[in-house]
Amino acid sequence: MKPSDLPLDRLGPLPLDQDGTPVFAEPWQASAFALTLRLHEQGAFTWNEWADSLGHELAAQRADCGPNDGAAYYDRWLAALQNLLARKGIVSANELMQMRDAWADAYAHTPHGQPVKLRA
């Protein structure tokens, strides 16, 4: 599935280039986007469930008067994905926190310029 095959109009202010292709300021944003598409393809959630989850997060951002830029958009994207997976019982909130902590630890212990890798 390609992004052009999906109804992207339901995803709020998705940063797009002049051809309508999603653009990313950071590699993790592209990874979060790709992971979401893959999980949808595998049947983890419907596109409507995803759009509703992201819409909820974007509405919360607007209510908080948060910045409306690409970085904030993908922060909300990631939060929407985590919340949707937790609500559907695919991953627990505790597992998400453990993974976040593992990545933070790996990042803190990785020399500058080296790729961040989780410890086994």
Image: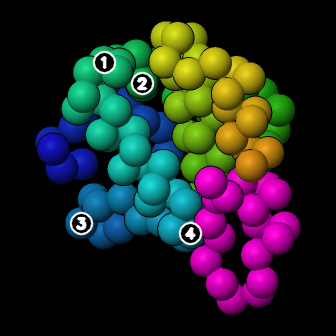
Element under disc 2: helix
- Contact, CB < 8 Å: mark 4 with mark 1? no
Dot 2 or dot 3: first in sequence order is: 3
Query: Residue 67 at x, y = what percent?
Result: 75, 50
- Foreground of the two, 71 or 100: 100
Query: What mark, if any, has residue 19 been given in the picture?
Result: 3
Mark 3 crowd level (few <14, some 14–19, many ≥20, 10 Å Cα): few
Numbered disc in front, either 2 or 3: 2
The first of marks 2 and 4 along the sequence is 4
- Residue 65: % across, % down: 81, 38
From the image, which quarter does the N terminus lie in?
top left
Give the residue type that dot 3 points to: Asp
Q: Is residue 82 left or right of residue 96?
A: left
Q: Nearer the viewer, residue 45 or 75?
A: 45
Q: CA distance from mark 2 to mark 4?
A: 22 Å
Q: CA distance from mark 3 to mark 4?
A: 20 Å
Question: What is the C-alpha distance between the residues marked 1 and 3?
Answer: 26 Å
Category of crowding for the residue at label 2, using alpha-carbon neighbours closer than 10 angstroms: few (below 14), some (14–19), many (at least 20): many
Note whether 18 is above or below 105 in the view shown.
Answer: below
Amino acid at dot 4: Glu
Q: Are marks 1 and 2 in contact (CB under 8 Å)?
A: yes
What residue would you read off at disc 1? 46
Sooner in the amino-acid sequence: mark 4 or mark 1: 4
Determine contact: label 3, label 4, CB under 8 Å: no
Which residue occupies 49% across, 11% down? 88
Q: Which mark is residue 50?
A: 2
Residue 38 drawn in magenta:
no
> Type of residue at label 1?
Thr
The magenta stretch is 103-120
Distance (Cα) linking label 2 and label 3: 23 Å
- Quadrant in the picture for the C terminus: bottom right
